Image (cartoon, rainbow, N blue to C red):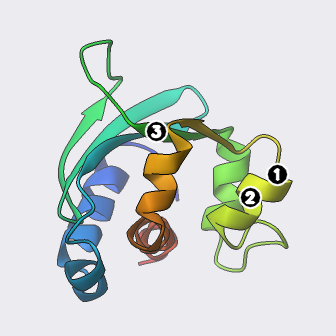
Amino acid sequence: MSEYPGSAWLARYRERVNKDPELGVIGDWFTTTFGLTFGDHRYALRVEKGRIAEIVAAPRLDVRMSFGFRAPVEVWRKFLSRDPPPLFHDFFAMLMRVPEFVLEGDSLAAMQNARALHRMMNLMRETSHA
């Protein structure tokens, strides 16, 4: 995870998400822009039908995001580890029990796309260990 969360890691993540056959089935209605904040590094992911169409680094006010996930890099590293510690194995568990892992914005929009979002978040771990 040495490149994490840099542009090379995000490019690999995007490729993995966009080739994922499961997201090809469950992501048909998942079209939004959401944020990922890794410590001081913030990104906007524009998703169209379960595929990442664009990643914007350090988005400004002109990039509208429905929701986002924010956490210190240490929390993300635990989530992305090969064998995550208890509570860090799933982003839903982290939302409930890890105060540093925060869902920002429209939580309803996030939960309306929970299945596709769950798969997309789990692909992060696969990207980190490919």
Answer whether labels 2 and 1 touch (C-beta < 8 Å): yes
Q: Amino acid at mark 2?
A: Met
x, y (%) of residue 13? Answer: 33, 62
Residue at 61% across, 32% down: 39
User: Separation of disc 3 and disc 2 at Cα?
Assistant: 16 Å
Q: Is residue 3 visible?
A: no
Label 1 sits on what residue type?
Val
Q: Which mark is residue 84?
A: none
- Which numbered disc, 1 or 3, marks the residue closer to the eye? 3
Choose top left, top right, bottom left or bottom right for residue 30.
Answer: bottom left
Residue at point 39%, 36% (across, down): 66
28, 77: nearer the viewer: 28
Amino acid type for the residue under numbered disc 3: Phe
Give the image location of residue 26, x and y in percent: 29, 80
Label placed on residue 98: 1
Q: For residue 87, which quarter of the picture?
A: bottom right
Q: Earlier in the sequence, mark 1 or mark 3?
A: 3
Q: Secondary structure at mark 2?
A: helix
Name the side, left or right, on which 104 lies relative to 117. Answer: right
Quote the CA–CA distance across marks 1 and 3: 18 Å
**Label drawn at residue 94:** 2
For the residues labelled 2 and 1, the Cα–Cα distance comes to 5 Å
Quarter where residue 80 is shown: bottom right
Residue at the spot 49% in from the left edge and 30% down from the top edge: 41
Frontmost of labels 3 and 2 is: 3
Q: Is residue 91 left or right of residue 74?
A: left
Please provide percent x and percent y for residue 2: 51, 53
Q: Residue 67: which disc?
A: 3
